[in-house]
Amino acid sequence: MSAIVTTLEQRIGRGATTQEFFVNMGPQHPSTHGVLRLVLKLEGETVKDVIPVLGYVHRGVEKMGEHLSYRQFVHLTDRLDYLSALANNWAVAKAVEKAAGIETNERIETIRTLVAELQRIASHQLWWGVFGMDLGAFTPFLYGFRDRERITDILEETIGARLTMNYIQPGGVMFDLHPDFQRKVKEFIAYFRPKLEEYETLLSRNIIAQERMRGVGVLEAAQAVALGATGPVLRASGVAHDLRKSEPYGVYGKVEFDVPVGARGDCWDRYWVRIEEIRQSLRIIEQLIENIPEGKHLLVKPAVRTKVPEGITYSQVETARGVFGVLLVSDGKDVPYRIHVRTPNFNNLWAITRIAPGWRVADLVTMISSLDIVVPDIDR
Amino acid sequence: MDVSRMNPIVAPPLRRSGFFADIVAGLRSLLQGMGITFRYFSHPSTVVTQQYPENRATLKMFDRYRMRLSLPHDENGFHKCTACRICEQACPNGSINVVSRKGAVTGKTELDRYIWRMDSCTFCNACVMACPFSCLKMNGDFECSVFDKSLLVFNLTRYAGPTSTVLMKVENPEERRKLWEPRDVYSGPLPLRGTELPGGGKTLGKPEEPARSET
């Protein structure tokens, strides 16, 4: 930068200087993925500092939860990380089941695992498309959405909703699997494996995309852990932390899959980890789809307001973006005394303050996109 | 944490071999990517976009698709609702209001109006799940846009009049039909005063028209 400054001074004379200035990126910016406002401290086009400003979609979900029964609260979690609605539902269901001592059966857990993994793929497909678009390639966006539509259709047939699903309930799931579910999922896997290779050819092996990701925005493992980053962001920094492995819930303990981790923690690693996670999710689904155990799909009467004994319960699941945790504080009533939600994106967002300084604004867009941020999840 | 159980697979490094080799490999990667684009371009049958307003006649929503709440009536105009208010309590944001009355003859509580506010409904299906008589259904009728928010307050009971026990005693269906008092689906705070609903009133005025998913 100093080289440019001296050149300017030499050219113009009269002691022309550059100065630092502040620019708002967002809240209405196409590549901030929602109403996220980043205040950038710039020197020329070099980012000196990034200050995220939050609160544009704050809805007070935690406070609302204090007036809703546990079953009613589930539908609010759809609206946090809307791309992992099922995993969020699951976290609440798991917490309530743990606190109230509700046992679930094998079928319920298998259904939950299947739909959550399907949605993880759908979420990563959407991310892949949007990531391509943020790099300046519009084509991946179309292909990503085309294949995501297949999963959305499968889930829509069983669940009845495309985005805000409210499917996994304390004590079971809302509907039983649709009779076509197994056939359609098998068809999807057969369809999607070649398409994933296409994704690789289109974007992963593209030299321009590679050069824009390689070495950009390196997040050290120690920094990632200190920030509390989870999910692919943490794993790309080389920390093999995956709740599905370390404290298996659902039927993750019975299936085989690997945990992809990055080597350097740059944008390329975050990209690669997510693409590889799609493959691992396909592996999990393939192992489970053949024999889904028989049983009831809902063990609690839907009209009953579940009462939770006094105490504090915490449960967490691994969503497509990281650890989603729910803390229930109960005073023995049918509504929680306090409900706290730990969302992965809030912690992942702050990685941008560590990795962005020193890079250009165009690289900042790549970095935000590689963190895969969903803004309603940050503000909640 | 037991790291050995993790089976981590580590990201491979991006290989760079040399200046000219990279140029050749890079150009090839670009051409391969363009090849995919041109393959789809030259095969229009692979295009999957739905032409929505044009395909309305053939568009079929899934049976479970959750959209407009409905209180299915049988061919005699009866519904199974007993005004127990369980759905009202199950609703997370007060979108349902069950107005009950004392039956003129029987003296029992019966449903007068079933008011559903679509403007605050989140389609979470809690009311349908909670109903002990399975008298509610969310159907796939998704074309519900209006120009005025107050038009999103619906009355799901189609008829008012004597209770079913009284009505059943009337043998002649024509006579029975005369005892009903037809209700407007619209029950918002503003009276309609005969004005046409936006969009020709087609969606709002005919709730009995079955949703496409059921046909």
Image (cartoon, rainbow, N blue to C red):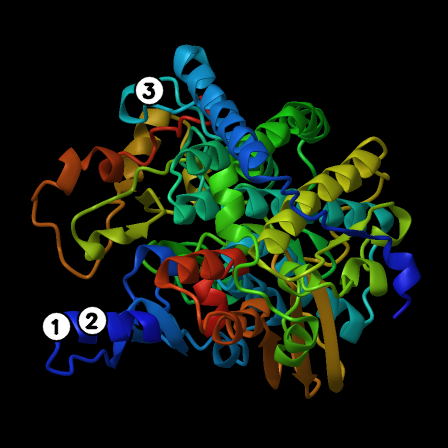
Q: At which x and y percent is residue A255?
A: 87, 46
Amino acid on which the number 3 mark rests in the picture: Asn
Quadrant of the rendered image containing residue A313 = bottom right
Measured along the vertical axis of the image, is residue A96 above or below residue B155? below
Residue neighbourhood size for the residue with mark 2, other residues' Cα within 10 Å, grouped as few (<14), some (14–19), many (≥20): some
- Residue corresponding to mark 2: A8
Q: Secondary structure at mark 3?
A: helix
Give yes or no for contact between labels 1 and 2 (Cβ–Cβ under 8 Å).
yes
Give A201 or A242, whichever is nearer the viewer: A201
The chain to which mark 2 is attached is A
Residue at left offset 55%, top offset 42%: A125
Which of the labelled discs sits on residue B55, or is there none?
A: 3
- Residue corresponding to mark 1: A12
Residue neighbourhood size for the residue with mark 1, other residues' Cα within 10 Å, grouped as few (<14), some (14–19), many (≥20): few
- Residues at marks 2 and 3 on the same chain: no
Which of the labelled discs sits on residue A369, or is there none?
A: none
Q: Nearer the viewer, mark 2 or mark 3?
A: 2
Q: Quadrant of the N terminus of chain A?
A: bottom left
Q: At which x and y percent is residue A147?
A: 53, 32
Residue A93 visible in the shown view: no
